[in-house]
Amino acid sequence: MGKNTKLAIFPEDAPEKSPNRKLLGVEEIAVHEIIGTLSRQNDFDHQFRPLNKYLRERWVNAYLALERDGWSPILVHKVADHYYVEDGHHRVSVARALGIAFLKAKVWEYPRQFKSTRECGNMNCAERSSAKQYLTAME
């Protein structure tokens, strides 16, 4: 149908090497805000449905673990308002299938990247003031 059904991929290379990330700890996160992965884009679609038959047994085991003991927190990386799974893909898949709204997750957060710069306009910017003072002194 031409619609992209691939799972989103984390937007940065080697997130564990990012000096700007911050560990938020374990939090309850909304399942619908989990949109991607760090490494499993070929195993799940954009709705975290398994794409391969060999994943079926792990999916069933994740479901049984929930029924038996509950789940340990998944591991996610947060960029803006979206989460990318590092560990816990099957748990997210089962949660979506069962309509579970929130999961416990260990969350690493990354600051938003703002690329827009402000023009000085008519303001007295330090760069402009210094340049004017320097030019005046040279004359």
Image (spheres, rainbow, N blue to C red):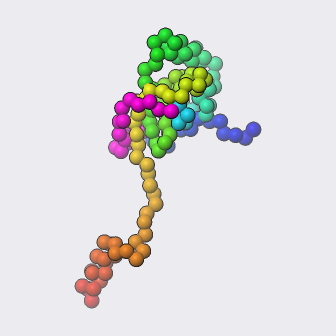
Image quadrant of residue 41? top right
Q: Which residue shows up at 34% across the image and 75% down it?
A: 124
The answer to whether one can see residue 139 in this image is yes
In this view, the residue farthest toward the right is: 1
Taking the image as shown, residue 26 lies to the left or right of residue 31, namely left
Q: Report x, y in % for residue 69.
A: 45, 12
Q: Which residues are magenta?
A: 15-30
Residue 15's image quarter? Answer: top left
The residue located at (43%, 69%) in the rendering is: 119
Residue 123 in the magenta stretch? The answer is no
Can you say whether 18 is above or below 59 in the image?
below
**Where's residue 78, x and y in %?**
45, 39
Q: 52 or 31: nearer the eye?
A: 31
Is 26 a magenta residue?
Answer: yes
Is the residue 84 above or below the residue 80 in the image? Answer: above
Res. 93 in view: no
Residue 7 in the image: above or below residue 127: above
- Image quadrant occupied by the C terminus: bottom left
Location of residue 112 in the rendering, given as x and y in whole percent from the top left corner: 43, 49
Left or right: 40, with 137 as reference point = right
Residue at horizontal 41 percent and vertical 31 percent from the top: 27
Residue lying furthest bottom? 139
Judge from the rendering whether residue 74 lies leftward or rightward of residue 44; answer left or right: left
Please name the residue shown 50% across and 28% down the image.
Answer: 102
